[in-house]
Image: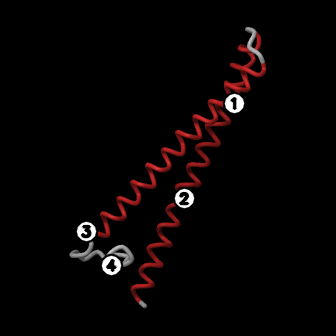
Amino acid sequence: MRQIGQVLAQVSQALEIMVVLVTARGVLLLAQILVGMCQRCQELVVCRMLGASKSLLRGTLWCESALLGVVSGVGAVIGAEAALWGLSARCSTSRGSRITCCGWCCR
C-alpha cells in the first residue's frame, strides 16, 4: 500500500510539473505570436505593394506554418525522449541507493 502511495505521489508530482511547463510554454507562445503579428502584417503589406500576389503570400504563410509545426513536433519528441531517459536513468540508479524508485520500471 505504501508503495502504491509513493507511485501515486510521484505521478502526481510529475503531472503538476508538466502542467506548469505546458502552461508556461503556451503563455510564451501566445506572447510571441502577438508580438510577431504586427511586424508580419507590415511585411505582408510591403510585399503586396511590391507586387506579390495573394496566393503567393498565402502559400508562403502556409509553408512557414507547416515548417514551424514540424520543428515544434521534433522539439517535443526530443524533449519527451530526454525526460524518459532521465526517468529511466533515475530508476536504474536508485536500485542500490536510498532513493525509492517508482517500482514500475525496476521489475
* Quadrant containing the C terminus in the rendered view: bottom left
Mark 4 closeness class: few <14, some 14–19, many ≥20 residues within 10 Å: few
Depicted 17 relative to depicted 1: above or below: above
Give the mark count.
4
Q: Which residue is mark 2?
A: 20
Q: Amino acid at mark 4?
A: Arg
Q: Nearer the viewer, mark 3 or mark 2?
A: 3
Q: Position of residue 98 (x, y in %)?
A: 25, 77
Mark 1 closeness class: few <14, some 14–19, many ≥20 residues within 10 Å: few
Q: What is the C-alpha distance between the residues marked 2 and 1?
A: 26 Å
Q: Nearer the viewer, mark 3 or mark 1?
A: 3
Q: What is the C-alpha distance between the residues marked 4 and 2?
A: 30 Å
Work out whether mark 1 precedes mark 4 in sequence or the reverse, and give the earlier one: 1
Q: Position of residue 101 (x, y in %)?
A: 33, 75
Front-most of 39 and 91?
Answer: 91
Q: Residue furthest bottom?
A: 1
Q: Which residue is mark 4?
A: 107
Q: Is label 2 in a helix, a strand or a loop? A: helix
Q: Check contact, mark 2 vs mark 1: CB within 8 A.
A: no
Q: What is the C-alpha distance between the residues marked 3 and 1?
A: 48 Å
Q: What residue is rendered at 67% in x and 25% in y?
A: 60
For residue 101, side relative to residue 8 (left or right)? left
Work out whether mark 4 precedes mark 2 in sequence or the reverse, and give the earlier one: 2
Q: Which residue is mark 3?
A: 93
Front-most of 91 and 31?
Answer: 91
Q: Is label 3 in a helix, a strand or a loop? A: helix
Q: Position of residue 11 (x, y in %)?
A: 47, 72
